[in-house]
Image (spheres, rainbow, N blue to C red):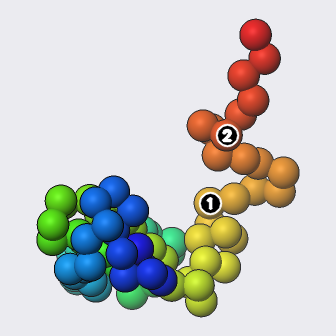
């Protein structure tokens, strides 16, 4: 949706970009990566005005800060674990 400008659910083209933000209290649409709100990574939202579907995107330049904070070497996301039954 971010790149194509087209909603993957309804094929709508009326897409609204809602920029991420950080307030002094730490509130807003962001992910904390440090001790203060100044180091938070902003999360931008893309909203289809036709059906309400939304996606959240992080600027590519902010990804290294998230990796260093939240990913340990060899660690995968909890939902990515293979189910062996």
| Residue at image location 51% in from the left, 72% down from the top | 33
Foreground of the two, 7 or 31:
7
Given this view, does label 1 or label 2 mark the residue nearer the observer?
2
- Tell me if mark 1 has few (under 14), some (14-19) or many (20+) residues whose alpha carbon lies within 10 angstroms of its own: few
Quadrant in which residue 24 is drawn: bottom left
Residue at 32 percent of width and 67 percent of height: 11
On the question of residue 45 being in view, the answer is: no
Give the vertical position of 73 relative to 40 (above or below).
Answer: above
Mark 1: which secondary structure? helix
Give whichever of 9, 34 is nearer the camera.
Answer: 9
Distance between the alpha carbons at the discs numbered 1 and 2: 15 Å
Snapshot quadrant of residue 19: bottom left
User: What residue would you read off at disc 2?
Assistant: 80
Q: Which residue is most to the front?
A: 11
User: Looking at the image, which residue is at 64% across and 46% down?
Assistant: 77
Residue sticking out furthest to the top: 85
Which residue is labeled 1 in the image? 70
Image quadrant containing the C terminus: top right
């Amino acid at each position: 949706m971010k790149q194509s400008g087209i909603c993957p659910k309804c094929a709508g083209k009326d897409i609204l970009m809602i920029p991420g933000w950080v307030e002094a209290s730490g509130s807003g649409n962001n992910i904390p990566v440090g001790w203060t709100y100044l180091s938070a990574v902003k999360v931008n939202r893309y909203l289809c005005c036709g059906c309400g579907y939304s996606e959240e995107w992080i600027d590519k330049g902010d990804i290294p800060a998230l990796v260093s904070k939240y990913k340990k070497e060899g660690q995968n996301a909890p939902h990515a674990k293979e189910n062996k039954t």
